[in-house]
Amino acid sequence: MRFAPGCPTPTTSACSLSAPQLRRFDQWSARRASEFGLTHAQHQLLLAIRGHADPRGPTIGDIAGYLLVRHHTAVELADRTQELGLVVRKRDRDDRRLVRLALTAKGRGRIRALTTAHLDELRTLVPLLAALVEDDRYAAKLSRRDTS
C-alpha cells in the first residue's frame, strides 16, 4: 500500500484511505436496516442486546453505554423497538428495580437475517482491515527503531 505524501505515519495514511469505505459500509448498513423495517439505531439496539454477555440481558443503562447515547434516548429507542414486537422488557429477578431487555422470536429472526447480509458485506472489507493491521505493525516497528 502506498502512503499519501506528507502523512506522518503509514497508519495515518491507511486510516484516511479506509475512512470512506467504512462510511460507505455504515450507510449500506443503514439502508439494509431500512429494508427490514428498522432504523439504523434500532438495528444497533438489536445487535447490542444480542451481543450482551449477561444472559439476563442488558439494562437500559447498558444499552445507552453501548450506543453512546443518553439514558432517555435509549428508553425511547427501546420503546419504539418494543412497539414493533422485536424486544421485551423484563424485571430483573435479583433486583426488581432493574429492567432488562430481551429479543423476541421476531427480533431474533430480524437480527439473524440482517447479520447474514452484514457478514457477507464485511467480508469485502477484510483486505482493507488486514492492510490497516499490517500498517499498524509497520508503524510500531518504525517507532521501536526510532526509540532505540
Image (spheres, helix red, strand yellow):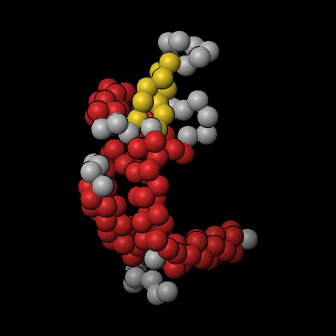
Which quadrant: the C terminus?
A: bottom right
Residue in the foreground of this view, choosing between 89 and 137? 89
- The percent position of residue 15, horizontal first and vertical second, equals 44, 70
Query: On the picture, is 54 further left or further right than 46?
Result: right
Say if 46 sits above or below 117 in the image. Answer: above
Q: Residue at x 57, y 13 (%)?
A: 95
Say if 27 sits above or below 74 in the image. Answer: below
For residue 143, say whether it is visible: no
Residue in the foreground of this view, choosing between 94 and 20? 94
Q: Residue at x 46, y 31 (%)?
A: 101
Q: Residue at x 49, y 26 (%)?
A: 100
Q: Residue at x 48, y 34 (%)?
A: 102
Residue in the foreground of this view, choosing between 124 and 68? 124
- The percent position of residue 13, horizontal first and vertical second, equals 44, 75
Query: On the picture, is 116 further left or further right than 135?
Result: left
- The percent position of residue 6, horizontal first and vertical second, equals 40, 80
Residue in the foreground of this view, choosing between 14 and 70? 70
- The percent position of residue 108, horizontal first and vertical second, equals 46, 46
Residue 137 quadrant: bottom right
Query: On the picture, is 21 further left or further right than 39?
Result: right
Residue 117 quadrant: bottom left
- Residue extending farthest top: 96
